[in-house]
Image (cartoon, rainbow, N blue to C red):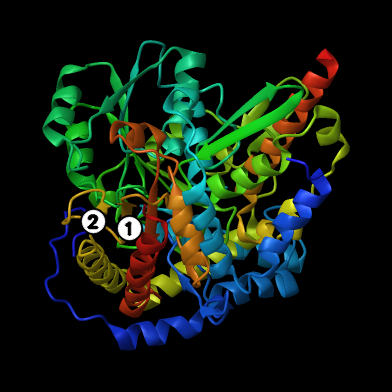
Amino acid sequence: MDENNRPSKLQGQPADVAWADEMRPQFPILRQLVNGQPLAYLDNAATTQRPQAVIDAVSNFYARDNANVHRGAHTLGNRATAAFENARERTARFINARGADEIIFTRGTTEGINLLAHVLSASLLQPGDQVLLTEMEHHANLVPWQMLAQRHGIRILYAPVRPDATLDVPHLSDLIRHQPRIKLFAFVHISNLLGMINPAAELCAMARDRGTLTLVDAAQSAGHLPLDAQKMGCDFMVFSSHKMCGPTGIGVLYGRRELLESLPPWQGGGEMIQEVDFGRTLYAEPPYRFEAGTPNIAGAVGLHAAMDFLDCVGRARIFHHDQDLANYGYEQLTRIDGVRILGAEAGRAAILSFELSGVHPHDLVTFADQQGIALRGGHHCAQPLMRKLGLSGTTRASFYLYNTRDEIDRLVEVVRGAKKMFAF
Amino acid sequence: MGDSLQEKEKQLISEFARIHNAQECLGLLVARARKQPPLPADEKTETSKVAGCLSNLWFVPKMRDGRCFFQADSDSSIVRAIAGLLCELFSGHAPAEILAHDTHLLQQTSLDRHIASNRRNGLGRLIEKIRRFASENLAQK
């Protein structure tokens, strides 16, 4: 599977039950009853669960190796530094960056975008320059640019979403061709609201042809399919550890080496300097230039374990399993009168965002929770798109490698039950 | 309307005391939501919206013959029912009575266990609004 192409629908794919049976015991949190029912965790687009291997890696780091990184000359300091830098190298391999110096650790996707917005405004973006976004962005890829527009006078353009909730690529291509001041095109790889997969490589190529930089928000894709930054051809990429089996509070900003070298620092402090005097400071080389202060060392160690775990399972297999669940869920849910799933049937990730006529999403989420099913209701941090689609909220079920068709059957029963109980 | 606030609260609590599980509780709330008269469309305005609630919640307070009357509506059945309970409790009472009554209705009916914390915030604001309205009308007298 090429992650940069839209996947085709897998017809009649049987659920890999044996595989899910192998996955589930590795996630201790799944071995519990919630409100008297086995937990069906279907809120993976918000955050995923952690396998024992990740929990152990974080716990062992604190139990055996904890110290501050980079300048400690003692044994623990060396171990912690090695663990932290190994995690950076592992991340580079995970997305096929050219080297570890292209990997900046952040607190997560949101911080990565804020960091980039800040440093670009202090260098490459001039007042009057344009940043192109899409209408399907998460607030994390909207608000930092709006703040920049207010502070720095840049302008924001939006590539439209079609009524079938796919990106209007011809319109987008026109914008890139005819708006010479677009300096950056920042777009989501997989929409957290719609679940639609955007053709990242195609979009990056389109921008590159016009000399426009690209930022890919890979928050929903990094843990779900093979990612290759070089093949995708993006200039920057961001993602969060907690959406791919890793700890919270750590994420990644990937940037092409040449670009990172040309960018100024974001925050000032320890770790990001080469030399400080009372009058001036020489900044460190990337990636350290962008990592002021003590980093989330245990988080990086946990992220390393998560990437090992995902690659041991196989990201192509995870994507295959996701696709099976998405297709099965789509088919089963659309059989219920009154259910409308946002987005097209094909070309989607394992995210089903739907309306149930006459039932408020939060009522459905509460009803499902009573039966041990974790869903999410609301605007999913995509209010502008919600408004454009004429909605105030949806219910979202999002799946991952430990979910099963049985859990989707339970979801379908709950939706039917909620319809009976609430619709009037 | 003769019952005191304490008596009314006791009656409402006893209605929920018969409930054995969360699903029955939800059933009772939905039944109450269905019976509750909706707010007229022209009263569902931005000003009557209660901030801080995940779903839309509208609240309209009125004074009649020295007594407060409250009405609430929501696009969520659960919120509509719980907001309706609070309005039912406090409606028909004088501002001084309302201000003297510290309600524990949500805790004593265990409804607070069935609603998410962010919904609790919105309903908490509704109680604040009821008390503020009472206080404003007490000051006017």
Question: Which residue shows up at 63% across the image and 74% down it?
Answer: B20
Direction from residue B57 to residue A233 in the image, left or right: left
In this figure, which residue is indicated by the disc labeled 2? A348
Image spot of residue A23 (x, y percent): 42, 81
Amino acid on which the number 2 mark rests in the picture: Arg
Which residue does the image show at 78% across and 19% down from the upper left?
B136
Per the image, label 2 sits on a secondary structure element best described as loop
Q: Are marks 2 and 1 in contact (CB under 8 Å)?
A: yes
Q: Which mark is residue A351?
A: 1
Q: Which quadrant does the N terminus of chain B fall into?
A: top right
Q: Residues within 10 Å of mark 2 (few under 14, many from 20)?
A: many
Disc 2/disc 1 C-alpha distance (Å): 7 Å
Does A174 appear above or below A30?
Answer: above
Q: Residue at x 64, y 62 (%)?
A: A298
- In the image, B36 versus A134, the foreground residue is B36
Query: Looking at the image, which is closer to me, A108 or B108?
Result: B108
Res A17 seen here: yes
Amino acid type for the residue under numbered disc 1: Ile
| Rendered-image quadrant of the C terminus of chain B | top right
Q: Chain of mark 1?
A: A
Indicate the position of residue B67 as horizontal and vertical percent values.
Answer: 74, 27
